[in-house]
Amino acid sequence: MTVSWNLRAWRIAWPVILSNVSSPMLSAVDIAVVGHLPGPEYLGAVAVGSRVFVVLYFGLLFLRMGTTGFTAQALGAGRPDEIRAWLGRAGLLAGSIGLLIILLQSPIAWLGISVIGPEPEIAVLAEDYVLIRIWSAPAALANFALLGWLFGIQATRTALVTQVFMNGLNIVLDIWFVTGLGWGVEGVALATVISECSAVMLGLALAGTHLRRIGGHWDLRRLADMDRIRWMMRVNGDLFIRSIILQISFLAITAVGARLGAATLAANAILFNLFAFTAYLLDAYANAAEALTGEAVGKRDPVSFRHAVKAAGRGAVIGSTVLTVIFWAGGPFFIDLMTTVPEVREVAREFLPWSIFMPLVSVWSFVLDGIFVGSTWSREMRNSMVAASLAYGAALVVFVPTWGNHGLWFAITIYMAARAVTLALRYPRLSRTVGAAPH
């Protein structure tokens, strides 16, 4: 039994890991093709414009997370009509928000670029980038919803196909539009628009094959079920607040690091790349926890719920341990690979131990996030994030003035641990409700 659950978790996780790894490849190509244009303003414009969308879309990740939980529970309950309905509800919500973003494109572009505050020459090019790329907002958000639905039915290999197709097409178009046709920043933005729209069309076509396998029928009355819609809005609202708080917390890391000197800021950026690799793996097992625990909640099956929690947790702990060993053995090599500046190398080595052990600290918050997403216990996730952020803010105030960058890293460690502890305290009550009345 244990082996089969471990395999189920791995089969969900590995395509997500590969999908996550494909995204940095796209970023690297963006930088490479624009970096060969005459003048640094082009690269700066793409960096600024991309950041606008990172911030904008980060708060809308509930379209992915919430949809996974809803769909997984419908799958576990054996309700094919409801599985279809959640795809429709999530798609309609994503499309509506995307159209609103297009309508508000001018203020969004102005506000996003103004907050970042680039030089005027870069700002003009960045605005061109934003005002082109923003037309794919409905497709980008529909992709979030579609990924969430595919994770919910445990079709992560299909999700991998759509993401690799999207990023691969984007890379090809980047090279063609910028290097071949000389379209510059506008070419990078247009490549993203085309690839995101194409990925959604492919995803919907592939989703159709899963719908035929699952069965059921489309029912407009079920799609417009107000109780379900209110549930969706409540859960997504909680997840939105959680995402905004998380974004602010990560921005605070950069803001505090910038006040500790240029070398420290650069060193932290390198070390956070190691944390990004950690997130690629742990996110995958969080997705496995979402799908498997959501299915168990839908079945009202506490035994399956416990097996799902253990399998996802076991895989994540093994993965985080492997990463810790890799960072311990290869950390100095990774640092030298990412910078040739002696001062930055020296500073990064000094603070490398924090990154080495961060996977072992972070693993619990990722897995518990997945469990609570699958169970749609969003209010508890929101409250946990508030409490953890308060602890994090207090740690920054207390430890950074005394310990400098060590204090910053200690505060980050407290933050990740507090996220896990606050959810762990709520876990026993969640576990007891599986098999009882819906939460």
Image (spheres, rainbow, N blue to C red):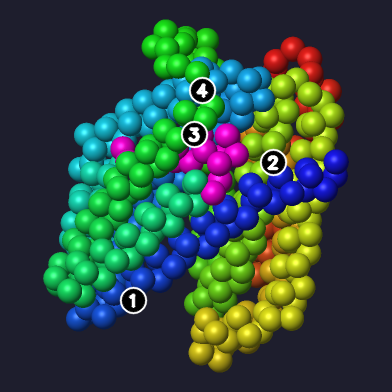
Residue interval drawn in magenta: 138-157
Q: CA–CA distance between discs 4 and 1? A: 46 Å
* Circle 2 residues within 10 Å: few <14, some 14–19, many ≥20: many
**Closer to the camera in the image, 47 or 141:** 141
Disc 2 to disc 4, C-alpha distance? 25 Å
Q: Is residue 116 left or right of residue 216?
A: left
Of circles 3 and 1, which is in front? 3
Q: Which residue is mark 3?
A: 210
Mark 4 and mark 1 lie on one chain; the one further toward the N terminus is: 1
Tell me the residue that label 1 is attached to.
Answer: 32
**Rendered location of residue 260, percent (x, y):** 56, 71
Of circles 4 and 1, the one toward us is 4
At x 78%, y 64%, the residue is 321
Residue 140 visible? The answer is no
- Distance from disc 3 to disc 2, alpha carbons, whole Å, reads 21 Å
Residue of label 2 = 289
Earlier in the chain: of badge 3 and badge 2, it is 3
Label number found at residue 62: none
Instruction: Give the residue displayed 78% in from the left and 31% down from the top.
Output: 305
Contact, mark 4 vs mark 3 (Cβ under 8 Å): no
- Report the mark closest to the observer, 2 or 1: 2
Q: Amino acid at mark 4?
A: Gly
Residue placed most toward the observer, 211 or 122: 211
Image quadrant in which you'd find residue 8: top right
Task: Please name the residue that numbered disc 4 is placed on.
Answer: 215
Question: Of label 3 and label 1, which has the lower sequence position?
Answer: 1
